[in-house]
Image: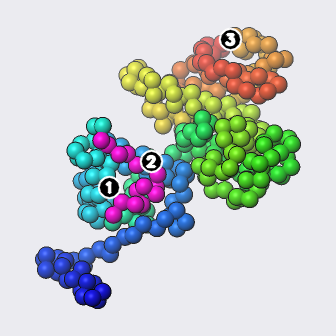
Amino acid sequence: MFGTHLNVVFVIPLLAGCVNEAPQSYETSVGTAAMPIDEGSAEAVGLLGFLNDPATTLQILDDEIGLDLRAATNLISHRDGFDRVYGTPDDDPFSSLAEVDSVPWVGPATLEQLLTYADDQGFVPSQHDYLGTWDGVEFTVNQADATLAFANTADLYHLDYEVGLDSRAVDSIGSARQLKTIEELANLYYVGHDALLLLKEGALKAVPGSNKDQFVLDLALELTHQYALIQVSIQDEGGVSLQEALDGLDVSRVWEVLSEDEDPLAHDLDSFVVYVHPDVVFPDSDMLWFGIYDNELGELLDIYSYPSAAN
C-alpha cells in the first residue's frame, strides 16, 4: 500500500504535462540545528527584512530570484494573510528564519537564494548599521560582534566580579560558549536587559580606542533615528542617503576635544569627555558632530551638531 502511494505521487506531475522539465525536489524544513543561517545574525535580519518589505512580490521571488513557484507563492501567501493583500490586519510578517523555513517547499536552498538576493539589494546590515534590539538593548552590527567576542572570550571571573554580571548569567554564558549571535546570548537563562547592557559596555571598553569607537557607534544610531524621522527633508535639502552617511563614519576621523574653547557648549573637561566627527549628512558643510560622555561612567549624555569654529 505504501509503495502504491509513492507511485501516484511521482506520476501526477507527468500526467499534468511537466515532461520538458524534471520537477524540483520537495524542500523540507531543516530545523534550527541545521539552519544554514543563524537566527538573529545580520544575514537573518536582512533576509527577513527583504521578505517583509512591501516591494517584495511574487514576481520578484519567482522571476528575479528563480524560486520554485510553489515556494514563492507560499511565502507571499503566508506574509499577506487570508485576503492576499499586504498592509491589512490579517498580515503575518515573518519574525524568524524558523518561520520562513516552516513554509511548504522552503528549505536550505531557498533560504540561500533569498539571502543572496537580499544581500545584493542592500538589506543585510553591516558595520554601523542597526542590527536589532534585544531585551531593550540596541545593537549595531559592530556592537553585536564586539559583545559576542567579549562574552565568548572574557574570563568568567572577570564577567562576574569586574563586569558585575549575576553569577547565574555567568554560568549560562560559560556553558553556552561559543555563542554565534546576540539573539542566542539574549535567550540564555538570567541574561536580560541588565546583563546585555553590561556586556555591551564591557566589550567596548575592552577594545583599544573603544571610546572613539563607541562615539562612532552612538553617532550611527543617532543618524539612523534622525533619518527615520526627517528623511524626506534631509534629502530634499541636498543631504546624502542614510547608507551614504553611515558609510562616511570612520573612527580615524574622530578627535577628542582638549580645550573647552573647541566645544561650543564649553563642557567641563574634568567631568566630561567630548569627541568630534565631521558631518557625514552634508559632507561638504562646515558642521561637526559632538558626543558628550560622562568622564567617570563613560555614559553618553548628548550628541549634537554645530558649525566648526574654524569657519
Residue 171 location (% of width, % of height): 77, 53
Q: Main secondary structure of the magenta part?
A: loop
Q: Which mark is residue 95?
A: 2
Mark positioned earlier in the residue sequence (1 or 2): 1
Q: Is residue 48 left or right of residue 248?
A: left
Name the quadrant of the N terminus.
Answer: bottom left
Magenta stretch bounds? 90-104
Residue 56 location (% of width, % of height): 31, 47
- Observer able to see residue 255: yes
Colour scheme of the picture? rainbow
Name the element at disc 2.
loop
* Amino acid type for the residue under numbered disc 1: Leu
Q: Give the spatial CA distance, label 2 vs label 3.
A: 44 Å
Mark positioned earlier in the residue sequence (2 or 3): 2
* Amino acid type for the residue under numbered disc 2: Ser
Q: Is residue 30 left or right of residue 188?
A: left
Q: Please give the residue where the numbered disc 1 appears in the rendered image.
A: 75
Q: Is residue 13 magenta?
A: no
* Amino acid type for the residue under numbered disc 3: Pro
Name the element at disc 1.
helix
Q: Which mark is residue 264?
A: 3
Q: Nearer the viewer, residue 35 or 276?
A: 35
Q: Give the spatial CA distance, label 1 vs label 2.
A: 13 Å
Name the element at disc 3.
loop
**What is the tally of numbered marks visible in this picture?**
3
Q: Residue at x 59, y 18 (%)?
A: 305
Q: Nearer the viewer, residue 257 or 117?
A: 117
* Residue at the far front in the pictured view: 1
Q: Residue at x 30, y 62 (%)?
A: 71
